Amino acid sequence: MSAPITESIPIPYEVETLSTERLALVPMTLDEVTEAHSPLARSRTVTKYLRWEVRDHDDEADSRSVRKRLALSHITRQGDGFVWRVEFATPDGEQGAEIGDVSVFAKSLRNKQFEIGWVFHPAIHGRGLATEAAQKVLEIVFTKLGAHRVYAELDTRNEASGRLCSVLGMRQEAVLKERELVADEWHDVAIYAITESEWAARAA
């Protein structure tokens, strides 16, 4: 008999700083998320294909929406999420140069479904840094949060993110035609996903 849902989902989960060979993933504060913590967060070149990250943080309504969705320190209920700021790791442990961020949202605790998203500066493309950061977050979501399935939704024109999904072992499950209206233009949205068994097979 399978364990009850309340026992099989290890919540509340407290977000922590993560480390990889070249990177440090640091939990962002609420102010950093909602007040455009860096020029990267405002860059339309960087964020033009992204979904919830593409926000004018000076807009009060958008700021309230982001605040409502981000728990930032704990995942305790469905809809909670948090964001890691991705930086170069430094030998002395001090803050290094920021290259992007990775976010996670608990979409369905009953069904163990989590959404992952990211934004990285184009200058770091081709060096495997985005893969390194996203792989670490996937590891945490599957091993610490007990995810059954992790998915990403992205604009079909976002070729860099599509390639990253493939590198991470995420399958393209669907393309939703004209899913979202952005700046008077309809955008198609692709859904990529990876299940726990697929992730475990790759990690073995």
Image (cartoon, rainbow, N blue to C red):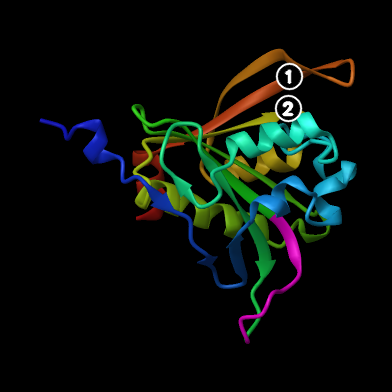
Q: Position of residue 32 (x, y in %)?
A: 72, 54
Specify whether 148 is left or right of 192. left
Q: Is residue 94 magenta?
A: yes
Q: Which residues are magenta?
A: 92-100
What amino acid type is highlighted by mark number 2? Thr
Q: Position of residue 164 (x, y in %)?
A: 64, 45
Residue on which disc 1 sits: 188
Instruction: Judge the density around disc 1: few (<14), some (14-19), many (≥20) Cα neighbours within 10 Å.
Output: some
What SS does tag 1 mark?
Answer: strand
Which quarter of the figure has residue 181?
top right
Mark 2 or 1 closer to N-term? 2
- Residue 120 vs residue 103, the one in the foreground: 103
Specify whether 73 is left or right of 36. left
Check the image and report above or below for 118 versus 121: above
What amino acid type is highlighted by mark number 1? Asp
The dot on residue 52 is none
- Residue 15 vs residue 49, the one in the foreground: 15
What residue lies at 63% left-to-right and 87% top-to-bottom?
Answer: 92
What residue lies at 71% left-to-right and 62% top-to-bottom?
Answer: 127
What residue lies at 41% left-to-right and 45% top-to-bottom?
Answer: 199
Q: Is residue 138 magenta?
A: no
The dot on residue 156 is 2
What SS does tag 2 mark?
Answer: loop
Query: Quick check: marks 2 and 1 in contact, CB under 8 Å?
Result: yes
Instruction: Judge the density around disc 2: few (<14), some (14-19), many (≥20) Cα neighbours within 10 Å.
Output: some
Which quarter of the figure has residue 27?
bottom right
What residue lies at 70% left-to-right and 34% top-to-bottom?
Answer: 64
